[in-house]
Image (cartoon, helix red, strand yellow):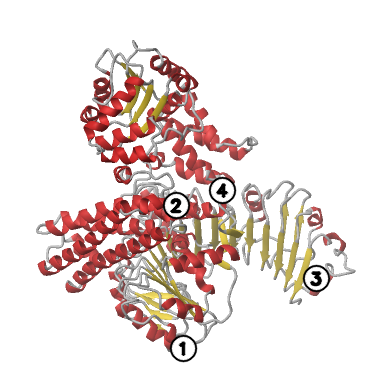
Amino acid sequence: MAEAVVSMVLESLALLSTELTLSSGRARLTDQILDAQGQLIMIRSLLEDADARQSHVDEVSDWVATIRDAVCDLEDIIESYVLKEASRRNGSWMQIIARGFACVGVVDIGKTGLKIRRIRAQLSDLIDSFINYGIVSRMRPDNESATSVRNNLMSRRTYSHAIERFVVGLEEDVGSLVRHLVGGENSPSVVSVWGMAGVGKTTVAQQVYHHTKIRYHFDCMAWVCLSQEFQSRDVLQEILTKLISATDEQRREFAEMNASEIAELLYNTQQRNKCFVVLDDIWTRDAWDSLKLAFPGEGTKSKILLTTRSEEVALHAAGGEGGFLYKARPLMEQESWILFKQTAFPEPVAHTESIRQKEVLGMKMVERCGGLPLAVIVLAGLLARKNTVEEWLTVSEDVEAYLRGGKYEGKYEEGLIAPISSESAENIEDASYGYLNELVERCMVQVVKHSLTGNIKTIRLHDVMLELCRKMAERENFLYVVNSSEATQTQLAASCNKVPRLAVYLFSILENLLHAVNSSEATETQASIKKVRRLAVHLDGIGHELAPPCDKRHASLRSLLFFVGGHYYSDIHRKLLRSLCRDFKFLKVLKFEDMKAEPEVELPSDIGNLVHLRFLSLKNSEIKRLPSSVANLVCLQTLDLRSVEWVSVKIPNVFWKMAKLRHLYLPLNHRVTEKLSLATLHNLQTLANISSQDCDLKDLIELTDLRKLVLDAREPTEFKTLEEIMISSSITFDHLQSLSLVTGNGNGDIPTLIVLSCPHLLKLQLYGRIKGFPDDDHFSNLIKVTLEETNLQACHIKRLEKLTKLKVLFLRMGALKSETMVFSKEGFPQLEFLSLLGLCELKEWTVEEGAMPRLYSLHIGYCWRLRAVPDGLQHILTLKELTIKRMYHEFCKRLEKGGADFDKFRHASVTITNKR
């Protein structure tokens, strides 16, 4: 957890230092920030081990806690500085950055620099205490030297024992290297393996190191991975220690020796014995020159194998053209494919259609790996964790971005969740969902319900895991909970059905875990908390006294979640809102949902003070106006304003200033003061409840990254206008997965072209006339379809039933303009849920044997002319739920005990309500 906190602060420092570098007169502050970044990078490396061991060693736990507090204080200093400048210039902090900090006061810069220096001094002391005062030895059971720890903090470590699980195409090359190394005194003493990054140099070295002939031939062996800026003395000591399997006493003696003494002792050891040393990743000629005097060279039985990216270094180390060089070669196409399959399909799999599609995609992606084994393995490992063809398709659309190897350039400011790269096709939502999947795979989180697409929709925690997380969160001061309920819950059920909120749920997952803490526990915890940065408040009919007070402990709040246990109306909410907007200006996450008040609440203009907000949800809160000051929230990524239908919300034209917005949910009932400008929102993925009268329809074609769109055409001709715009621009929405088109009261026409411009839809909802359902080839991925007032003919059902992936179908009022409907044999092969509601013209419905073989649930309601349930349904043994609502008495009587259809549905649970 502490490591994650460090990563977040590093991103804030990176953004600030970049912008300060572009402005004049800020060199000293920039230097302070860059130095702090260097310290945090080192600390993050230390925390990789410390986080894992702190539960076992008290000293380590205390050290981690102190580090975490210091890093959080550093974050406070940075954001306080930015906030002051935003206030001084009456603008947002991004506006300040955009203008190069031209008007930032020198005094404030000096004060900020002084504060940063104090934190840096504290961090420096903490690093020294970690390395020099025994914490390392208590944390590391192998008593690795403190110097070695320091030198390897920044290095990319490789290990002799970490053999690649799958190796392809190296047998002959490894054999050749082994023959040269065991060839005796006349063979080269240095063998150089060189090649570009990722081509497999280290893998070759590992295969040689573990070869049977090598193990048999040499008396002692050592493997050392070098950092770019290693200390030669420490490297030579590490080699010597490994070659002679040094005792603790010998290690203490080595620690007292200087570099020359270590080198001489290592030289003599190799003269007396047949030693084999691997030096992995030598970067420069100088690096080799600083070590070579400790190796005997020609005429000795000891040998060295080194790896390097540079041919010049390889030649230099091997003694020129007469030495032995091996250039690691890329894999052949067939070798790459074999290696890919071994990782991506580790277990034998049936050759299903899904596997066939994955193999086709896989072959194309492997070609783009250029024969680099590392690229093939990284790609295959990523795809092995992705279950659906759609996920593989997403990766295939931007393979190069995935193969850049986890580079995070700071263009996403997402807290704990970072995408593979800033240019990756896998965005922050995909990355967060991947983390959630990993939690499930490790049995840390239990899945309660999956969505129609197979994604995780609802999760919960076992009570044992809940208790463990509670204790960990308390110990690490990760969050604080105020709960007015006396009942202690034992399970968490967190709804994750909205993908845009997954990142937030993952960011605050431990916050949600602690909802079970009762008020007495919270009081005890409060006394021991130094500063509260994440707070969850449960309001259950009282509330205002549970709001966080504005004091030093709460002044640094980053995340504040309110949970309402019951619906009640109170003036408390106005006071809460004003307090939040005025007193907690560092907030990044604010969840203020289900808040009721009479009359409706106006969101305070002070909301514009919360310039660091990334997530703001006012869902189902009775807010009647959105102030124009929200334009200051330029960091905002998710804004959820969905409200009850009877509350009309006034919306200003401010969203165009919020370029980082990714998910925008407007109220179902709203009115705009002027047309909304949306063309600048290039990151937008969700746009819900937008009306064609709210914005210029031309803006919509700029939003090519949309994944979900809910669009209402108030006038019958407006969809026609949108169609014309799309024809002129030749635009397609390649990322759109969910589309809902509504034409006023269902009286308008929906042009087919709009739907056809979305080739990868998973969910489609149409409310209005459509001149025929498009061919099934255009919608082979559709999983859920909802139709209302579409006026389809019976023949159009033939196209619907050919959708091979369709699982859910709603046919509502006016969807079908026909008295008959036939579901053919083998039609709707994957359909699980069917709802027929308000099909007033339908008299006869025929289901042929073999149709809907997977149907589980059937709902029929308000179809008043339908005479009976089709006989063909009795052959569908998967049918478990049959719900009848508001149908005529004669229809219902056939399904009741003694009725004509009663025995046909004994295998299903039949529910009849509101008979007419």
Local SS, label 2 = helix
Under mark 3, the amino acid is: Cys
Front residue (pair 539, 219): 219
Q: Nearer the viewer, mark 3 or mark 4?
A: 4
Residue count near mark 1 (Cα–Cα under 10 Å), binned few <14, some 14–19, many ≥20: some
For the residues bearing labels 1 and 4, Cβ distance under 8 angstroms? no
Count up the numbered dots: 4
Residue wearing tag 1: 570
Horizontal and vertical percent position of residue 73: 28, 66
Q: Residue furthest right?
A: 898
Residue count near mark 3 (Cα–Cα under 10 Å), binned few <14, some 14–19, many ≥20: many
Q: CA–CA distance between discs 1 and 4? A: 47 Å
Q: Nearer the viewer, mark 1 or mark 3?
A: 1
Residue wearing tag 2: 431
Q: CA–CA distance between discs 2 and 3? A: 50 Å
Q: Mark number for residue 892?
A: 3
First in sequence: mark 2 vs mark 1: 2
First in sequence: mark 3 vs mark 4: 4
Q: Is residue 351 visible?
A: yes
Local SS, label 4 = loop
Under mark 1, the amino acid is: Ser
